[in-house]
Image: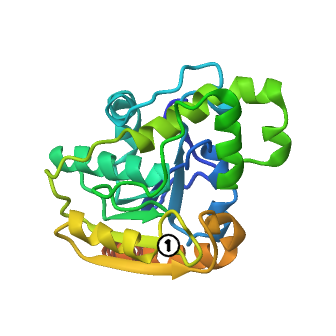
Amino acid sequence: MHRSNPWVQIFKPQENAIARLICFPFAGGGAQSFNKWPDHLPDGIELLAVQLPGRETRMRETPLSDVDSLLDAMLPEVQGYLDRPFILYGHSMGALIAYEFARRLQGMSLAPECLMVSARVAPHRRPPREPINKLPQAEFVEALRHLHGTPEEVLGDSDLMALISPMLRADFAINEEYVHAAEPRLECNILAFGGLQDSEAGRQGMDDWREVTDGDFGLRMVPGDHFFIQTAQTLFLRMLSIEIYQQTRVAWSNAHYRANARLACTSSR
C-alpha cells in the first residue's frame, strides 16, 4: 500500500495490476482530466495521474515553470510506483514532461515500456505559435480564448482568472521556454497521437517524434482538433487501450503464465 502522495492520484486502484499507465496533463489541466479513463482501459492496467503543484488538490502550492525543477521535485515522489511495467503518457505540455521524465528514468535503468504522446510537436521542434506566458493579463486572457482550451465562463470571471493565471502562465512557460538537448536519445518505443484538425501539432509535427528515439515509432491520427482526447474520447481511449495491450503484451504473457502455474500447483494438491 502506497502512502498518501500529493503528486499521485489513482482513481481505480488495482492491487494486482499487470502494468501502470502514468499520465501527465495538458497546460491548465490536472489529475482530474483522467478520472473517467480507467473505466475504458483493459483490466489489469492501473492508471496513475500525476498532480502538478498549483491546481486542484494542490491549488495553494506554487506552480513550477520549468521542466528540470518539476522533474527534480516529482521524481522521488513517483519513483515508488515504478515497481511493475509502465507506460508514460502526456497530452500537449504533458507530452513534453513525459518525454523528459522518460529520459531521466532511462539514466536510472528504469525505462518505460513505451512513451505515448499526443498533441505536441516533437521536442526538438519549436511550437508553431508565439509565446503567451509573459503577456499582460488582458492579452493573456484573449490568447487563451483563441486556443479554445479554457471555458468562456472561466475566461470571463476576472477574480477566478487572477487566481489561476499563475498556474496557467507557469504551464505555458514550461512549453514555450523549453530548450531541447539532443542527448540522451530514448531507447524505448514512442507512439504518437495527433488530431487531424489540430493546427498546433499536425501530422508532420507528430511524426517528428520518431527522430528522438532508437526504439520503434508509431503514429495514429484521430478526428478532432487539439483537444481530441475530449471531443473524440471514446474512440481515442479505444485506440489507446489497444496500443497499451500491444506495448505490454510481454507483461500480460508473464501474468498469464504465473496464473496458470498457480492453478496447476493448486490442482496438484
At which x and y percent is residue 213? Answer: 21, 65
Residue bearing the label numbered 1: 194
At a point 62% along the width and 61% down the height, the residue shown is: 38
At a point 58% along the width and 20% down the height, the residue shown is: 61
**SS type, badge 1:** strand
At a point 13% along the width and 51% down the height, the residue shown is: 183
In the image, residue 45 above or below residue 13: below
- Which image quarter is the C terminus in? bottom left
In the image, residue 131 above or below residue 40: above
At a point 84% along the width and 37% down the height, the residue shown is: 156
In the image, residue 61 above or below residue 179: above
Q: Is residue 1 visible?
A: no
Asked which quadrant contains residue 215, the reply is bottom left
Asked which quadrant contains residue 204, the reply is bottom left
In the image, residue 80 above or below residue 149: above
Left or right of residue 157, residue 233 in this image: left
At which x and y percent is residue 181? Answer: 19, 47
Q: Is residue 30 visible?
A: yes
Question: Which residue type does callout 1 highlight?
Answer: Gly
Query: Between residues 194 and 115, which one lies in front from this camera angle?
Result: 194
Asked which quadrant contains residue 197, the reply is bottom right
At which x and y percent is residue 97? Answer: 40, 46
